[in-house]
Image: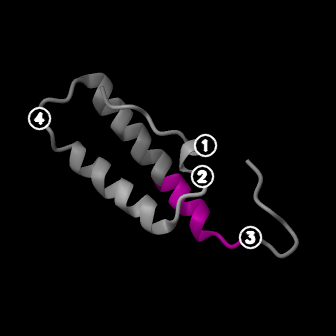
Amino acid sequence: MIALITMLELQGLTAQQLGELHQYFTWLLTESTLDKAERCHILATLENIERAMGYAARPTPRGFTMQP
């Protein structure tokens, strides 16, 4: 079973690491042996990775810090 990766787990990863995870989970979608639950977990994980990539790309305003 493929686990869902949450936003909390992705927090703190570099853009490089997020990109590699995105590439890996995109590749997993090509597997023909996936059941419906695994496919849903992969798609949700990809959505979370893309959100995390967007957060990583946004600059933090001066004087503010990102808090979980």
Q: Which residue is mark 3?
A: 60
**Above-or-below relation of 19 to 40:** below
Q: Which residue is mark 4?
A: 32
Looking at the rendered structure, the secondary structure element under dot 1 is helix
In the displayed structure image, the side of residue 24 where residue 32 appears, left or right: left
Q: Which residue is mark 1?
A: 8
In the displayed structure image, the side of residue 46 where residue 56 appears, left or right: right
Give the CA separation, mark 3 to mark 2. Answer: 15 Å
Q: Amino acid at mark 2?
A: Gln
Q: Which residue is mark 2?
A: 11
3 or 4: tag closer to the N-terminus: 4
Callout in the foreground (3, 1): 1
Give the CA separation, mark 2 to mark 4. Answer: 30 Å
> Is residue 54 a member of the stretch shown in magenta?
yes
3 or 2: tag closer to the N-terminus: 2
Q: Amino acid at mark 3?
A: Thr
In this rendering, the count of numbered labels is 4
Callout in the foreground (3, 2): 2
Circles 2 and 4, Cβ within 8 Å, touching? The answer is no
Circles 3 and 1, Cβ within 8 Å, touching? The answer is no
Region in magenta: 50-60
Q: Amino acid at mark 4?
A: Ser
Circles 2 and 1, Cβ within 8 Å, touching? The answer is yes
x, y (%) of residue 38? 30, 28
Give the CA separation, mark 2 to mark 1. Answer: 5 Å
- Residue lying farthest bottom? 62
2 or 4: tag closer to the N-terminus: 2
